[in-house]
Image: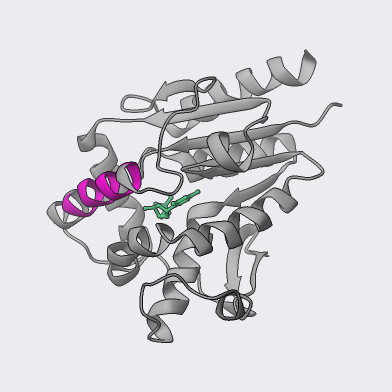
Amino acid sequence: MKKIIIAIDGYAGCGKSTTAKLVAKALDYVFIDTGAMYRAVTYYFITHQIPFQEPSDELLNQIQLRFFKVDDQPQIFLNEQPVYQWIRTKIVNENVSQVSALKNVRKFLVKQQQEMGLEKGIVMDGRDIGTVVFPNAELKIFMQASMEARVKRRFEELQTMNILMTEEEIRLNLIDRDYQDMNRQESPLKKADDAIVLDTSNLTIENQVNKVLELAYEKIRS
Ligand code: DC
């Protein structure tokens, strides 16, 4: 069967990663959460006390990111250490937009993301997948949802990870990240002209997955 690239972009808290993961599972495709890659680099900067300025290639080349399955879920490893419990903490949430705005960081990660898609059969979620990483992706989805729905989702997700943030803290962080992600100079968050908008405010995860799968099967059959 023909393999395609599925790019899922949109705001934080719309269910992008959860949907992408389940769509990838249903199609037996690779799932890549690029937000986790930006978060892991941010975690590296914080733990190594690196200032949030354009890093050199030499510095970036000390950062190795890999996804390995843990309990059947793809999780990110930084220099062979499992960091997936740490990348969703408040300190990373508060600094990831600054680190992901750095041109050299984006260049470093986009190159790796493009290599991951060489053989297609991939579902990748992020902010610039349909616009920059895979402008020729066969299927591009742009997810949006009301602030209320996004806060609720993030709150529940963080609770399952035992990360304590109030709904108000989450709301303020989402507003701040939306602003920074949409207004940065390098690859700002924006809908690709040929992306299909999916508003997930009133959809269950199952609904979201089924909608994306329907669109994917159309593309695979065409
Ligand atoms: O999807 P997320 O909330 O885990 O992403 C964390 C941050 O990383 C987000 O605020 C912006 C940045 N990001 C990005 O700039 N480009 C991507 N492709 C993915 C994430």
- Seen at 52% across and 23% down, the residue is 195
Name the one closer to the observer, 194 or 217. 194
- Seen at 54% across and 35% down, the residue is 131
Whether 175 is among the magenta residues is: yes
x and y, in percent, of residue 113 in the image = 65, 52
What secondary structure is the magenta-colored segment mainly? Answer: helix
Q: Quadrant of residue 91?
A: bottom left
- Seen at 64% across and 74% down, the residue is 64
Name the one closer to the observer, 206 or 116. 116
Left or right position of 179 against 25: left
Magenta stretch, residue numbers = 172-182
Q: Quadrant of residue 130?
A: top right
Farthest residue, direction bottom: 48
x and y, in percent, of residue 32 in the image = 61, 50
- Seen at 22% across and 51% down, the residue is 176
Kindly tell me whether residue 67 is visible in this rendering. Answer: yes
x and y, in percent, of residue 49 in the image = 38, 86
**Residue 16 against residue 174 in the figure, above or below:** above
